[in-house]
Amino acid sequence: MASISSLVNLSSVQFLPICASSSSLFPPFQKTRQHSKPKRHHALRVACSGDTNRRDILIGLGGLYGATSLSSNLSALGAPLSPPDPTNCVTSTVLTPENGTFKIECCPPPPFTDYVIPASNNTQFRIRKAAHLVDDEYIAKYKEAIRRMKALPDDDPRSFKQQAAVHCAYCANGYKQKGFPKNFDVHGSWIFLPFHRWYLYFFERILGSLIGDPTFALPYWTWNHPNGMRMPSIFTTDTTAPLYDPLRDPRHLSAFMDLNYNFGKEDNPHVNPTIKQINFNLVIVYNAMMPKEEDFFGKLFRAGDDPDHHYGSLETLHNIIHGWTGDNTNPNSNGCGKYGQHNYQEDLGAISMMSKIVSIPRRAAPKQAFKVRKTLLTLQLPLTLDSILRTTINRPKVGANPLEKEVLEIELEYDKGQRLGFDVFINDEDDDDIGPLDAEFGGSFVTLPDHPNQTKVSSYSLRIPLNNLLQALDAINDESITVTLCPKYGKKPATIKGIKIERVPLLK
C-alpha cells in the first residue's frame, strides 16, 4: 500500500504572491448600529489574479515541492515534522455517543511502498465540478465508482473501509511522531490542508481506476456561494444510493446552510434562505479567507510539538460544516460528503491566496442572551467563559514596523470531548444586538468532539488578525482596544488563560 506519510516534506508548504483587478462580491449593506464615534464602511471588493496559474497555486498550497524523505535530525526538537512510520501504527480509540470509548483498527495493511510522483506528461487532466451542478451521467458514474469501492474486500487497501481507516489512523492517535512519544495528528495545524489534499488525490484516483476513467474527478461543495449553501442533493435524496450516509443531521438535509450555527439553542433551520442568512454566511467565509498565511493554515507543527489544536481559519470553517451536517447525537459522524467538503477546502485555499481585502460592510444581528460581566481594564485570569467577558487590552506601539502586523491572541483550555463555540468582537461599545454582520466581529472559535487522548483538556491559542479590522473601525491609531468574548454553546465552557496583542512579521 502506498503510504501517504511518505509523500510530503511538511515543512515545504509554498506561499505564492498574488493580486490584481477587483470585483464586487457582496451587496452593499446599510449600517444600522449607533456608535459613540462615527464608523466608516466601504463596499467589499476582492481582487483576483487572472495571470496566476490555478494549478501552480494548488501545488504550492499542497507542498508538492517536498521530497519523500527528510535529511534532518529526527530527534531534534523543532525539526521539520517527519512522516510517521506505518509499521508502528497502533489501534485507535474513538468516542461513543455516550461519551465512552471503544477501540478500532485503523492501521493500513502491508506491504508499504513509498509513492513516486508521476511525471506531469503522464497525468490525465481532470475537471472538478460543483456538486449542485453535476448532470445525471456524472451522478451515475460517481455512484458506480463508490459502489465498486464499497464492494471490495475490507483488507483491500483501495476499499472504502480502508480509505476511511487512513483518515482514522491519522486523526485518532494511530501514529506517534518519529523519535518522540507524542501523537501525530493531521488536524489543528498547518498540515491540515496538505494532508487532506493528498488524501483526496488518492481517493479520487482509486475511484477513477475502478470505473476505468482516468479523468474522473470528485465533485466539490460550493458552500461559500448562495446557490450551493445546502447539502448537495446527490448525497441526500436517494437513501439507497452508495453516496448516502445515515450519519447526518436529518433536520439539515434540505435546510439552508447556517455558518453561524448555534448548537446550544433550539434548532429551527431555514428551508428558504433569507437575505440576512446569506449575508451571515458570506461574511463568515470572507473573514476566514482573508487572514495571512500562518493564521489561515494554522500553527506550525514541528517535531516534538504537542498535538494541541491550533486551527487556522480554514479548518475552523471545516469544523462548522462538519458540525452542521453531522448527526449531533454521534461524536464520530463527520457528516455529509466528507470527500466533497474536503475537496472544496482546496478551492478555498486557492481563492484565499488570490484575494486581497479592501473593506467590508456589515450591520447588526442578534446575539445570545448572556449576562455581561463588568468591563475590566485587566481581567483576573484564568476565568471560565460561562458568560460574556469584556476587557480592555493595550496595543503595542502604534506604527512600529510596517512589515509587522498585530494579532490578538487568546489562550484557552477546553474539553476536547465536546462541541464548543464562542465569538470574539472588537470595540463593541454597548450591549446592543451584535453579530457577524457587524464590523466589530473578529471571528469565532469552533471545535468538534475530538477522539480521546490521555487527557480531554486541550490548550489552544486563538489568533485573530487585527490590522484590517481596526482600519474598518477607524481605530488604527487607538492605544487600546476592547475585546468581548461571547459564548454560544458547549456543556463545559472554555477557560480563558490569557488575552494579549502581539506584533508578528509578515510572511513574504
Image (spheres, grey):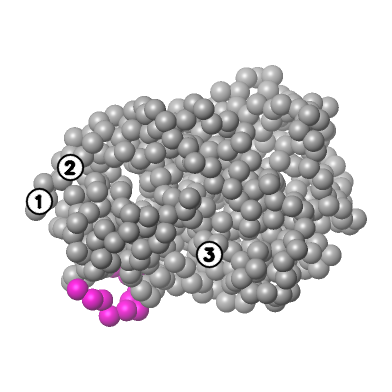
Query: Mark on residue 229?
Result: none
Query: Mark on residue 309?
Result: 3
Is residue 296 highlighted in magenta? no
- Nearest to N terminus: mark 2 or mark 3: 2
SS at mark 3 in the image: loop
**Of the pair 115 and 108, the residue shown nearer to us:** 115
Determine which residue is flagged by label 1.
Answer: 37
Question: Distance of mark 1 from mark 3, alpha carbons?
Answer: 38 Å
Callout 1, which amino acid?
Lys
Determine which residue is flagged by label 2.
Answer: 40
Question: Distance of mark 2 from mark 3, alpha carbons?
Answer: 35 Å
What range of the chain is rendered magenta? 377-388
Position above or below: 134 against 47: above
Q: Residue at x 23, y 76 (%)?
A: 378
Is residue 381 highlighted in magenta? yes
Question: Distance of mark 1 from mark 2, alpha carbons?
Answer: 10 Å
- Asked whether disc 1 touches disc 2, contact meaning CB atoms under 8 Å apart, the reply is no
Callout 2, which amino acid?
Arg
